[in-house]
Image: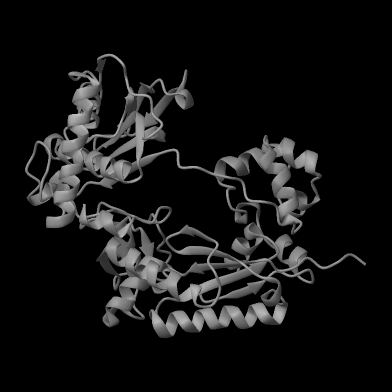
Amino acid sequence: MAESLPLRWLYLDLNSYFASVAQQLDPALRGRPVAIAPVDTDATSAIAASYEAKAFGIRTGTPIWQARAMCRDLVVVLARHEDYVRFHHAIIAEIERHVPVTAVCSIDEVACRLCDNENGGAEVRVLARRIKAGIAANVGTELRSSIGVAPNRLLAKMAADMEKPDGLTVLDDACREARLRALQPNDIPGVGRNMERRLAAAGVVTMDRILSLTPREARAVWGSVWGERLHWLLKGIDLPELATQRRTIGHSQVLGPETRTPDRARLVARRLCLKAATRLRRMECRTAFVVLSVKGEGRPGEVAITRGTAPAWSGRMATLPGGRWSHGAKLVAAHDSFTLLDVLNGLWTRMRAELPDARYRQVAVTFMELTDAAETQLALFDAKEGGGVAVTPATERRRLALSTAIDRMNTRFGRDAVTVGHDARGATRSSGPKIAFTRIPEMAEFRE
């Protein structure tokens, strides 16, 4: 008889996290349908919904105007991202009182590897209930979670999704295969619409069929080694995690009605660039490729844009629907605010010529091709940055010294105490990091 697979992972998924934080902070919202909006306009979409709102069909991504029509008693609450991060850290600290946190997967999900003395079926159930009770008692009664326990991290995450809200699912040998066969292919993390179409083209449309694939067949269907890894993970094998590294830094912002004009939108883009530059310096990294992405408010159409020359984009064309524009510019690796703003200014000028919409509804600035600042080879000769002035090593040193001095001033006296080239008061003033699902901002970012 084969030996049973040990239960190695506990995965905790906070239920409707942003909405739950709002209900925890304001008792008047408890038991009521709540939608969280990024900006104060019905033209935006919900970034979270309470379970009371979900009962009316309101989900993440539902337009606010439509959500109000679906539920006339809906309460729309502006996002409070600093609170989400603050509660996140309090929840992590509470979980750590019961079991070490191995990985913070997102602002509302964590994974914990279990030791041999706590991975029996009865023991993990006691542990899970103790964690839930600790969060309720020491962080907040509205912060409920679903917990999944399984032989590997992927299955534990899938188990956490099986019973919501406030669920507890243990995928042991006795029930694992039966519970998996009851799922749909898109219940597997990473299987979205494009992957579903690829699977359907190969005749794979049920979990039964996925579970019956051989390792070689799974690799062929997925078109990568991930298919073979997934085969073994679904069998319960606890494979080593693949090493990952940060490849990009960036910020995006959905614009409120008052900041959608070109001049105001440009100031927001500059602010996002400066915030990303501050993070870049704090991480002691440099960037060699800057990307500007913009969504216009004009009529949906198709604008063909040739992407930049970064290796990941070489030779590629992108057709971006609905008045969208995205382009990147190469530069000598840098991390001072002034050089990066020069590059952004060049990209913005190009964008205005190619996408001359009267108003814009979203902007994003992303830094790619990151390198360690201490290991980066600086230019030996003058270099042109994004069509701006020549940058010599001496100029780069002066710019970096001034950039770090501004960082210190803003840390001491508050966000936007010192800005570069514009007045940050009013609608252009930063309100702090935004939508923190996949990346948890450092608390320092709320003061930058």
Name the residue located 40 percent from the left edge and 20 percent from the top edge.
309
Name the residue located 59 percent from the left edge and 53 percent from the top edge.
189
Give the residue at the far top of this rendering: 381
Q: How many marks?
A: 0
Residue 276 position, x and y percent, is 29, 42
Image quadrant assignment for residue 176: bottom right
Residue 300 position, x and y percent, is 32, 34
Image quadrant assignment for residue 313: top left
Name the residue located 70 percent from the left edge and 48 percent from the top edge.
230
Give the residue at the far right of this rendering: 1
Q: Is residue 8 visible?
A: yes
Image-based side of 28 in relation to 438, left or right = left
Name the residue located 64 percent from the left edge and 38 percent from the top edge.
198
Q: Is residue 141 visible?
A: no
Image quadrant assignment for residue 385: top left
Residue 283 position, x and y percent, is 36, 45
Q: Is residue 323 above or below residue 1?
A: above
Q: Nearer the viewer, residue 171 or 238?
A: 238
Q: Nearer the viewer, residue 91 or 348?
A: 91
Image-based side of 162 in relation to 250, left or right = right
Q: Nearer the viewer, residue 62 or 121?
A: 121
Which image quarter holds the N terminus?
A: bottom right
